[in-house]
Structure formats: C-alpha cells, structure tokens
Image (tube, coloured by chain):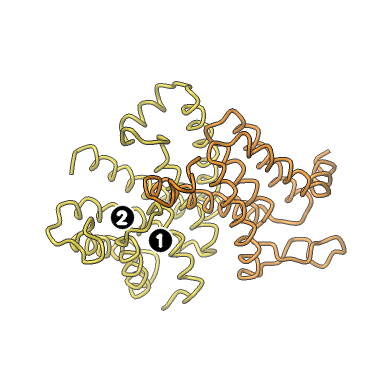
Amino acid sequence: MSAFETKRQAAHMAFGALLVGIGVLFGENALVAFLFACLVGGLALLNWHRLGGRNKLVNGILDSFERRFIEFPGKGALMYVVGALFLVTFSQNLQFALAMICALAFGDGFATIIGVRGMHPLAWNKSKSAEGLAAFIVASVASASLFVPFNTALFFSVILAVVEAIDFPVDDNLLIPAVAVLLKLGVGVPA
Amino acid sequence: MLWDVSQWIDQYYYVLLACFTIAGLFWFRHKKVFIIALLLTALIAPTAKQVFAEDRPCVGLGTCPVSEGFPSVHAASAMVFAFAAIGSTAFPFFMIVALVIGGSRVAFGVHTVPQVIAGFALGALIYCVVWSMAYKLKDEEVAVRHGLMD
C-alpha cells in the first residue's frame, strides 16, 4: 500500500475519532449539529471547487487526501459525513451510533491497511483478503466495545465485516451505516 | 413572516415539487440518478415513518397531519434535490430551498428539528447510494445501456 493510501486511511480514522470525541464530550445534539454543518459546508465548498473555484485550503486537502482522476473530488469524504449523519440520527441511541462510527472508522480503516498486504483472498471476493476481514473484526470489536457490550460489538462487527468484504456497488461509507441501522431495527441490540 | 412562508410552502408543496422536478430534469447533471433517488425517497421515507412511529410535536391538534413524524419526508425529498444539483450553478438555490423547507416544517410545528435533520440525512443517503451505484457500475453494460450516468 502506498504512503498516500496509508495517509488516506489515517485521515479516515482520525475523522472517526473526532466524531466519537465530539459525541462523548458534547453529546448527541452537538454531534448531529457538527455533522450537519460539515455536510452543508462541505457540499458548498466542493460544489464551488467543482465549478472552477480555487482555494488553497480546499486544494491542499484534496491534493493530500483525494485520489487522482476521480469524477467528483471529495466524494469519499462527503459519503463518510452522510453515512455518519444517517447513523447518528437513525440509531436513536448515541452509544450504539458511536460504536458503529468506530466500526466504520477503525474497522474499515484497518481492513484496508492490513488487507492489501493479505496473502489469502476471500472465496467470494478475490480483491479482499481474509487478513483484511479479520483486521476489520478485531479493530471494530476493540473500539466498539468501549460503547456497547462485547457481545453486541462482536455480533455487529462480524456482520459488517462480511458485508464490507462483499463487492457491493455501494460506497462502504454508506453501506456500513445503512446495514448497521437496518440490523439494529431488525434484531435490536443484543445484550 | 416565517409562519406565512411555512404556510405557503405547506399549501403549495406539491406544485413546487413538480416545478422543481421539471427544472431539475433540465439542470441536473445526473438526471436518471435524481429521478431514481426521488422515487426511492418517496417510497422509503413514509415506510420509515411507520417503522419508527414517532409522534409529531403537534399531535392532538386539529391541523396536525395524521402520519408519524420521523423522518420528515419534505426534508428528505428537498435534500435529494440539493444533492442532485451538485456540480451545477443551481446548487446554492436548491440547498437554500432545502434548508428553508426543513425550517418551515419546524416553524409550522409539524416536525421537530431532529425529525427534519433525520429527513435530510435519509434523502442524502438515498441519493448518495444511487449515485455511488451508478458511478461504480458506469462501465458495466447495464449502466451504459441505460445511460445511468447521463
């Protein structure tokens, strides 16, 4: 994995940690307000950039963290904010939302960092590895169990790891929150 | 004045929806993604209301709509328009309209702020899922044949 991709994943995890920190320190309303402000402000900035507007800060961030030759620079970050906002508003349980943000940030982040070095491709998706799947589960359980019981963290982490490893044509930053919320609605939050 | 605006939006909402949809079909970059997302929102948002079954703040008052409050369908569909306008000069207009519509639902007393923001989040998620799928499939035969990214 290139240094650039490692930097992207570090930023992915750092933003997740920031969201968790805001949720823990200031509560659910502050986290929702922050995410909504990021969404509206981010959309405005990215749209302006897309229409040809140039700003050193925006350009610097995109050059540092965005992949080249992408249709809409900043799309990944936008999807991340949308997914996190959906997670927090529809979970209706801050602890569960924070646990799933940990799964999204650390589970997905470590799955990518470890997975590209994996030597055992998955049977159902050759582009992903067993090492990446395991890394997702371990990182997700370790971080999510700070907010929900261990059994709950393990249950959701395993399901989300398997879903993330399937080659759905949907961004992981949307898929993981959507599946987490649907799973919570379907089975509740086991003790 | 906010009450008057809110009342006007509530009274002419479906006219506005139709006009904006027609405008969007001329203005928006990804027209099919927009239409699919709007239709999905029209299906999913009312279903989500049934699932969450959260009361509106006006429940018990004569003028209160009978449907549940979480999430706001008005906010969800308004956010689909805002996302569909990304990449066009119409984006500021649709973003402001989305915020005004969301605010009007709170001012009118038919939704709480969390219900409106949940509506925004749902509309955004649905649009982004459809957009993401169309983008990832754009080199696939089905996307090319149906011009999904047109």
| Three-letter code, disc 2 | Asp
Q: Position of residue B150 (x, y in %)?
A: 50, 40
- Check if mark 2's residue and mark 1's residue have beta carbons within 8 Å: no
Spot occupied by residue B134 in the image (x, y as percentages of width and height): 45, 48
Q: Residue at x 42, y 58 (%)?
A: A175
Using the image as rendered, state which of residue A73 and residue A36 is in the foreground: A73
Q: Chain of mark 1?
A: A
Q: Residues within 10 Å of mark 2 (few under 14, many from 20)?
A: many
Q: Secondary structure at mark 1?
A: helix
Under mark 1, the amino acid is Met
Chain of the residue displaying label 2: A
According to the picture, the residue beneath numbered tag 2 turns out to be: A108
Give left or right: position of A180 versus A36.
left
Report the residue marked by disc 1. Answer: A100
Ranked by sequence position, the earlier of labels 2 and 1 is 1
Which residue appears farthest toward the front when viewing the image? B145
For the colour orange, the matching chain is B
Bin the neighbour count of mark 1 within 10 Å (Cα to Cα): few under 14, some 14-19, many 20 and up: many
- What is the x, y in percent for residue A4? 23, 37
Residue A75 horizontal side relative to residue B10, left or right: left
Count of marks placed on residues: 2
**Residue A142, quarter of picture:** bottom left
Q: Residue at x 25, y 65 (%)?
A: A124
- Identify the residue shown where x is 25% and y is 54%: A110
Residue at the image point whose x is 31% and y is 66% from the top: A162
Specify the quadrant of the image occupied by residue B45. Answer: bottom right
Residue A166 tag number = none
In the image, B83 versus B96, the foreground residue is B83
In the rendered view, tell whether residue A129 sits above or below residue B103.
below
Chain that the image shows in yellow:
A
The reply, left or right, for residue A190 in relation to residue A135 is right
The residue closer to the viewer here, B108 or A98, is: B108
